[in-house]
Amino acid sequence: MGIAVLMKQVPDTTAKITVSGGRVDESAVSKWSISPYDEYALESALQIKEAGGVDLIAVTCGPARAAKMLTDAAAVGADALVHVLVEDLSALDSTQVQAILAAAVKHTGADVVFCGKQAADTNAGSTGPGVAHLLGASCVTMVSEIAVDGDSFTAMRATADGNERIAVSSPCVFAFDKGTTELRRPNVRGIMMAKKKVIETMSPADLGVDMGGSSVSIDGHSPPPEKPPGQKFEGAESVATVVGKLRDEANVI
Amino acid sequence: MDITVIAETTGDGLHPVTAQLVGAASSIGGTSTVLCPGGVGAAEAASIAGVTKVISVKGDCFGSFDGGAWAEALNSVASGDVIMAAASPSGREIAATMAAMRGIPIVQDATALRPGISVTRPIYSGKAIETLTISTPCAITLRANAFDAAGGGGNADVSTVNRSADVAVAVREAIAKASERLDVAEADIIISGGRGMGDPANFSHLNEVADIIGAAVGASRAAVDTWDEIPHSMQVGQTGKTVTPRLYIAVGISGAIQHLAGMRTSKYIVAINKDPDAPIFGVADYGIVATWEEALPALKAELEKL
């Protein structure tokens, strides 16, 4: 069985985002990382791979800098790496991104896809369900735990009322939420091996994807609205004052 | 412009966001046809002002949640130029699947719409705001509580259609939440604790305050990552939940950038921290420099007087 893990490189969640000239300044991002939920997808796939009989293919679509993320995935155990080179991912709409990723998954031969429930840049969550449809696969989102039994999986997913344990057969797509498992870090041997791992780099055209035009155009970015400076009080004796203000000034209690 | 609104349901009725979807559709000059999955809330949907038609979509597949099956059943009766749904986990999945089925683009988690269609959405969990233009046909999901709800008094026609699809995701077991406490994603008031609480057992003090004012209890990522007793479902921030309550009270939370990203759009923010230089004070409307040990009993006493 092959598991394709879809990964997106995003600004690290600790990174400051600056806007200049009406656009987010990507060159000012101090650190790029694998999107956090994709990390849980990768870790879950690694655990299934350890049980045996599974090829793990790390797949990304993005600019040249995203290659580092694939090498990092190899350092913790990804068997093969596929990079669909797209310099400006934000210029593509969801149909284009999904067409590329679905074609890349088909190219790997994987029948199971793991991905994050959403990427930490747009926080959309369209990719998992969209790719599932294009692949003719079932889709389960909000997954926190997973176990495999032959061609079938059982998974725990979050719902509005708690959790559900579900069962589904391959082909399927799992979109992961933050789980309880500890994420592994690469060891020195893994890092050395990963340096030798070849990344298969291709263009959307190499995959036979007819991109068409984007139906979405970005008009601009802006920083979040500034809050006016608040009022600050010293000591627990000011609690009464603040509660009074919440009642009379803010009218929220 | 015909807009197909996918009703957001909560077991036996409509989630309040459904009326907000209709309100948003009207605000960009759209007429709403509301699809009710499993027929839930159809009569209620018909009474929302601005709804021209309600289609109660009934089928076996609506007995449990399989986003692919729901999307297939709903898609067969959707005819609008725009598919609109709530940006809830299920709404996002259904809308994304329907968009892929129709080969149309989707933009998720909009917080403002203008005719055109111009969409505003937070990116990087609110560290920046993006404005984009999307051509129709398309799908858009909307953030709860970001749009004015349409009023009542409507009297739309309700029709019922039978549509189902093969269910691939089988539910083996449903596990209810450990506590009956309100979810932070749904709450109007949230009180959150950070690592400054010192010990997970001390969250009981937050629970006591929450009980008085009907608040949900949240936590920072540091608290969730440090203590097994604090589940991820409580986490507010970039890898947890993004929340917009009318009142957010942060206790013992320093205000890491990823926490601020998840709560800075709260209407009013109160911060309680013993460190006067904690970044959380930068977004607080009312800051109290004090230890939680001193401040929480005082807060409890004051709130009980209300």
Image: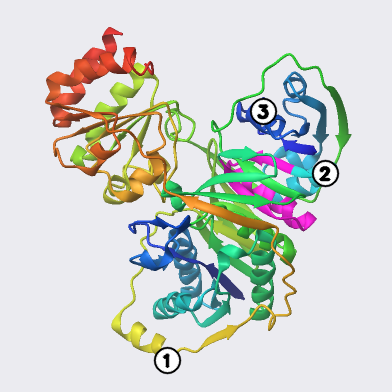
2 and 1 marks in contact (CB < 8 Å): no
Q: CA distance from mark 2 to mark 3?
A: 29 Å
**Relative image position of residue B43 (x, y in whole percent):** 77, 20
The stretch in magenta equals: B83-110
**Relative image position of residue A186 (x, y in whole percent):** 34, 76
Residue B220 picture quarter: top left
Residue B188 picture quarter: top left
Sequence order check, earlier mark of 2 and 3 = 3
In this rendered view, identify the residue nearer to me: A242 or B183.
A242
Vertical order, A119 against B84 (above or below): below
Kind of residue at disc 2: Ser
Q: CA distance from mark 3 to mark 1?
A: 56 Å
3 and 1 marks in contact (CB < 8 Å): no
User: Given this view, does label 3 or label 1 mark the residue nearer the observer?
Assistant: 3
| Residue position for label 1 | A196
Disc ID at residue B164: 2
Residue A213 picture quarter: bottom right
Q: Please report the residue visible at 14 percent of the width from the left and 39 percent of the height from the top.
A: B275
Q: Say which element carries label 2.
A: loop
Vertical order, B301 against B42 (above or below): above
The question of residue B151 being in magenta is answered with no
| Residue position for label 3 | B23
2 and 3 marks in contact (CB < 8 Å): no
Residue A164 lies left or right of residue B162; in this view the side is left
Kind of residue at disc 1: Lys
The question of residue B87 being in magenta is answered with yes
Q: Say which element carries label 1.
A: helix
Q: CA distance from mark 2 to mark 1?
A: 50 Å
Q: Which image quarter holds the C terminus of chain A?
A: top left
Callout 3: residue from which chain? B
Q: Please report the residue visible at 26 percent of the width from the left and 13 percent of the height from the top.
A: A244
